[in-house]
Amino acid sequence: MTNKFKAKISRRDLIKTTALTAAGATLAPFMGPWKYNRVWAADKPILIGLTHDASGQFANSGQAEKRGTIMAIDEANANGGVLGRKIEYIWADTETTPATGSRVAERLITRDEVAFMVGAIQSGVANAISQVCQKYGCVYFNTNSSSPTESGKNCHRVKFVWDGSGANFARAAASGAVTKFGKNWILLTNDYVWGHNTSKATQEILESLGGSVADNILVPVGTRDYSSILLKLQQAKPDVVATAVGGDDYKALRQQVQELQLDTKMAWLSNQLDWPDIYGAGAEAAFGVFAATWYHYLDLPGVDDFVKRYQERWPDTRMNVPGNVTYNGYVAMRELLRAIEEAGTTNNIKVIKTLEGRVMKADDRMQHHDAWIDENSHHVQQTIYLATRQDQPRDDSDYFKILQTMDPKEVANPGESACNLESYDDTPTYEM
């Protein structure tokens, strides 16, 4: 089966484009929920669909991610593009909603004819997008969703998962927390797919170490008042509170924990602390122990230069240093463009085969260990960092103190054996 869409240019579009070209003008982005960024190209450009949230629970993370992907596109175009073609992108807000994610993916493929798709923060949205992409054969990079199911039972031949998973983070953090703080835990779980699967992974690891979960408190998406939950924690007095709460919900939780001074009265273990969820709150908000995939003060080749390029590209953004979400968006997009160049084509099957098993050197990725794309789950196996609050900040952006660097093999998720990728023959051919 082949899904190769012909370019559709209306008479109105042709007249408008001709007029603009004659006037020496450039095409400005369309302002609205759909933005189409056109870069001049002599030949047909390669169009990338960006599915980054701008509203909903993960709006800040979605826009941080978007800045990273655009940086990689800009840099590729400055170096002549890919396969002699310029890279363009079209962006749509997926609203942190799976139903919107499905509609966006369908529209990007069938109407806008994107060659590849990149983005998504919330795992339910990523799963919805990937189902549409698999139907057509469009290669999709899930840049920042971390539910273990994204590279487990919800994996797809066209989907590649770039963030560490909740299971990776739990394996990195749980054993040390049991030894240091105790075995009686309470879980706080965002009530959607990522929260449930991440807490499940945490509980399995805890119980394997002889610990037990006294309670698993569900946190509805959109929670802003945690008073009843925090009262319950005060009364229960657990050794550890392990959170799988993200986005704006997490910001509200951490603020109220600090206000009640509960950050020092019990141990807090966060599965992952995304930079957009903490930025602006100061180092004091980074309490407890948490995992991350990257930090802007890692003493590694390329980090300082990446921060500088980010600041030059985005001088007016409030988030004046890049975090893990921006980093994931950047390295994922950069690797996609490299893979297309190496494959010598935009053909989906050839690009997929170029990516499967791909090794990415530590220095190039600005991490401590080499990373690779698991050929059976399409999940990037990468360095995981354990961190806590920085007690001697170098400046007002220095929130994290790195406690430990974990090799990818140490935190590998055996649950990825549940992944059953579609065969190449059952994946539609797709090329733009």
Image (spheres, grey):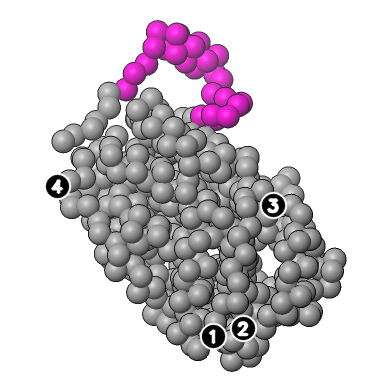
Between discs 4 and 3, the one toward the N terminus: 3
* Helix, strand or loop at mark 4: loop
> Residue 184 — which label?
2
Residue topped by disc 1: 211
CA gap between label 4 and label 3 equals 45 Å
Q: Which amino acid does label 1 sit on?
A: Gly
x and y, in percent, of residue 13 in the image: 44, 13
User: Which circle, 2 or 4, is nearer the viewer?
Assistant: 2
N-terminal-most mark, 3 or 1: 1
The residue at the point 65 percent across, 71 percent down is 297
Q: State the residue at coordinates (56%, 55%).
A: 191
Say left or right for 412 vs 243. left
Q: In this view of the protein, can residue 406 be seen by the observer?
A: no
The answer to whether the residue labelled 1 contacts the one labelled 2, judged by CB atoms less than 8 Å apart, is yes
Range drawn in magenta: 7-36
Between 310 and 61, the one lying in front of the other is 61
For residue 306, what is the image quadrant? bottom right
Q: Say which of marks 4 and 1 sits in front.
A: 1
